[in-house]
């Protein structure tokens, strides 16, 4: 739509000089979207909503937070007890963080199942992994800010991991700490970066959306659109679908905030940080547990760090590990079996990451870690060569409207 087609003269005047309204109209009306997208495609918009909620509530919380080791814990308690609606804003912020990771994990598993990482969407997938990495860094620094027992010791343990890097490890740890221990300089660094990172994530999200619009969305059967008969406009069909998904998401979030706000947190973080008293079992937030299990599966410190970062790095090269020309698992029977085995293995890693690093838990963590890397480095390349896939439909319209491709 050109600027002359808008009815409002003010809109036409603005759009002629800054075509933002034309861009929004193209995204909502003219952008061709595959007509067979299901509710698994809602998670992208839900992730965007989660990010917006986190930014708004984070800005409000920062107005009453004091980034100092002597006052941080008390300032959080003051937010909870004395600031008007402070308890609700904090609970929204901390529970939305968990919901954000739930949505992103489901978004990623959906991409794995339907082959959304395959050509020509490799860069789209890689930008998604960058967003995931930035989310993990932001969440870790945010977890330190309440300055409870788990905040302090989690920061101490995780930042110490970098000391395993040869030659430069100790320098990196000193830089992160701002000294020679986790102290006030560390808290100030983490608060500053935690405030900045969501805006960096928002910038990468914009690039992610631009890359998405370059080739359009993947779809459940994983074939490219063949023409107008395979697509519909994004609005009103998918906007209504997204609105329904958002309503369900907000309902579940409200239930968490008002009925069990601390269910996904750790009780030790309601104890002020004490450098002289180590918790019996140091664990990160639940969304880090699979990678924490991988870290502890190896007795060597450097080996554990390399495996933990390797678990993320392998996702960057996934488009070149799975060389099958068929995207969707609907037409890959063996891939579908191994996908669900991988899904169960990921859940097992999360469970094992929350258990003490002793006895049978260590053995199971090593088995699950080995299967994680085996899936990406061996099973997927072998399936690409030897799997017999089912025949693909000729077009998206064929399974949607029937073999004739016409509405009855």
Image: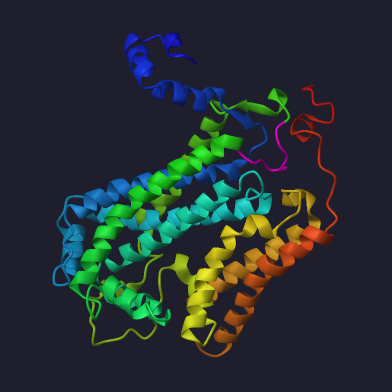
Q: Picture coordinates of residue 281 (x, y %)?
A: 39, 83
Inspect the magenta stretch and tell me whether residue 215 lies in it. no
Farthest residue in the front direction?
A: 167
Question: Foreground: 240 or 399?
Answer: 399
Above or below: residue 168 compared with residue 299: above
User: Left or right of 366: which side holds 102?
Assistant: left
Our reading of the magenta stretch's main secondary structure is loop
Q: Picture coordinates of residue 23 (x, y %)?
A: 45, 25
Identify the residue at image location x=60%, y=76%: 369
Camera sees residue 106: yes
Identify the residue at image location x=64%, y=43%: 120
Q: Quadrant of residue 278?
A: bottom left
Quadrant that contains the C terminus: top right
Over which residues does the magenta segment extend?
A: 216-225
User: Left or right of 302: which side holds 398?
Assistant: right
Question: Foreground: 38 or 223?
Answer: 223
User: Left or right of 274: which side holds 310?
Assistant: right
Above or below: residue 202 compared with residue 307: above
Q: Picture coordinates of residue 277 (x, y %)?
A: 26, 87
Above or below: residue 339 compared with residue 202: below
Identify the residue at image location x=63%, y=48%: 116
Inspect the magenta stretch and tell me whether residue 217 lies in it. yes
Camera sees residue 355: no
What's the colour scheme?
rainbow
């Amino acid at each position: 739509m050109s600027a002359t087609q808008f009815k409002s003269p003010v809109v036409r005047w603005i759009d002629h000089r800054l075509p933002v309204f034309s861009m929004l109209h193209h995204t909502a009306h003219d952008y061709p979207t595959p007509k067979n997208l299901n509710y698994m495609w809602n998670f992208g918009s839900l992730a965007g909503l989660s990010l917006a909620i986190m930014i708004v509530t984070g800005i409000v919380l920062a107005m009453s937070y004091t980034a100092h080791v002597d006052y941080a814990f008390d300032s959080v308690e003051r937010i909870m007890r004395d600031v008007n609606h402070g308890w609700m804003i904090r609970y929204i912020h901390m529970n939305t963080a968990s919901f954000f990771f739930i949505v992103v994990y489901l978004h990623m598993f959906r991409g794995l199942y339907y082959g959304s990482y395959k050509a020509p969407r490799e860069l789209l997938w890689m930008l998604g992994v960058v967003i995931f990495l930035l989310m993990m860094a932001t969440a870790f620094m945010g977890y330190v800010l309440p300055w409870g027992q788990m905040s302090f010791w989690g920061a101490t343990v995780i930042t110490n991991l970098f000391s395993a890097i040869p030659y430069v490890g100790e320098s990196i740890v000193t830089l992160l700490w701002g000294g020679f221990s986790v102290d006030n300089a560390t808290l100030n660094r983490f608060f500053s970066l935690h405030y900045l990172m969501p805006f960096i994530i928002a910038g990468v999200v914009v690039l992610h959306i631009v890359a998405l619009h370059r080739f359009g969305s993947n779809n459940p059967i994983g074939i490219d659109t063949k023409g107008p008969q395979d697509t519909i406009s994004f609005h009103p069909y998918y906007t209504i679908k997204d609105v329904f998904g958002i309503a369900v998401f907000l309902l579940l979030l409200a239930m968490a905030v008002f009925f069990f706000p601390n269910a996904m947190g750790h009780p030790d973080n309601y104890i002020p940080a004490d450098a002289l008293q180590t918790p019996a079992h140091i664990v990160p937030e639940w969304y880090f547990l699979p990678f924490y299990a991988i870290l502890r599966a190896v007795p060597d410190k450097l080996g554990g760090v390399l495996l933990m970062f390797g678990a993320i790095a392998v996702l960057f090269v996934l488009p070149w590990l799975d060389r099958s020309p068929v995207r969707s698992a609907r037409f890959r029977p063996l891939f579908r079996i191994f996908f669900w085995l991988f899904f169960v293995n990921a859940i097992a890693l999360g469970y094992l990451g929350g258990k003490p690093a002793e006895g049978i838990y260590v053995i199971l963590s090593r088995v699950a870690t080995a299967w994680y890397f085996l899936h990406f480095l061996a099973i997927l390349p072998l399936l690409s060569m030897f799997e017999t896939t089912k025949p693909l439909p000729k077009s998206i319209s064929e399974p949607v409207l029937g073999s004739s491709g016409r509405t009855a």
